[in-house]
Amino acid sequence: MYGIYDNSNVIAQFTAPISVRSNVPVFAVDALSLKRQVTKRPAQRWEVEASLEPLSFGANKLFSYIVKKGDFSVVTIVMPQNYGAKKALTSSSTPTATASAFSSNVVISGNTGLIPSGTFVKFGNHSKIYMTTSDLNGNGSVGIFPELRTSMSAIGMVFRDDVIMNAFIDTDSVKGMSYVDGILMDLGTMKFVEAL
């Protein structure tokens, strides 16, 4: 179940439509010859936009959580996994990962089964969320995006529905109550940007 996470529980579940975007600063310019020149920065963050399930009796927890966190405090969300990757996933192990900083590949050990490309992962000593860019069946090397921020040695990896992202609520999202039919609190669509 994906949504806003607090005290080991999802207090507000995401509903469709859900979008997950990769934001990478890029500068592009077209020359007079119409040849395009593109420069990319190494920074990257994930942005999640989703509707929230309307709440009635549990609305007080969500209301107080959102008002308390506002635009200035980190919230936690359960990162939505790609549906195709989730259906292809057969690994039920708890693997460890080793890699050097700025690497696009991570060496995985202790894995049985398939971890498909497009799976969001998080490493034990990182707050950053990564995505696999290649399939991994068993042990071996798997591609990740973006590049690894810091080195790691035999660090645990999570990759199922337990990938927790630290995020900020986007400044345009509602930070209060919005009721429909008098008893259902419905905040509509909210946007979360990864806290780097």
Image (tube, grey):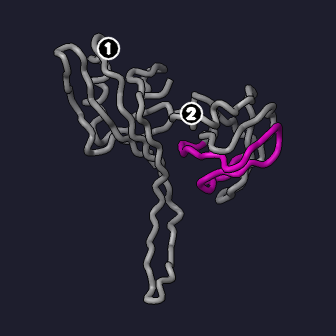
Residue type for callout 2: Val
Residue type for callout 1: Gly
Tell me if residue 86 comes above or below residue 153 in the rendering: above
Query: Which of the pair 72/87 is nearer the observer?
Result: 87
- Residue appearing at x 83%, y 40% in the figure: 139
Instruction: Report the residue marked by disc 2.
Output: 163
Is residue 130 part of the magenta span, yes or no? yes
Residue range highlighted in magenta: 126-152
**Label 2 crowding class (10 Å Cα cut-off): few <14, some 14-19, many 20+?**
many
Q: Position of residue 137 (x, y in %)?
A: 80, 39
- Residue appearing at x 45%, y 74% in the figure: 28
Q: Where is residue 81 in the image (x, y as percent from the top left)?
A: 56, 35
**Label 1 crowding class (10 Å Cα cut-off): few <14, some 14-19, many 20+?**
few
The quadrant where residue 153 appears: top right
Would you say the residues marked 2 and 1 are in contact, meaning their CB atoms lie under 8 Å apart? no
SS category of the residue bearing label 1: loop
Query: Which of the pair 36/81 is nearer the observer?
Result: 36
Instruction: Report the residue marked by disc 1.
Output: 58
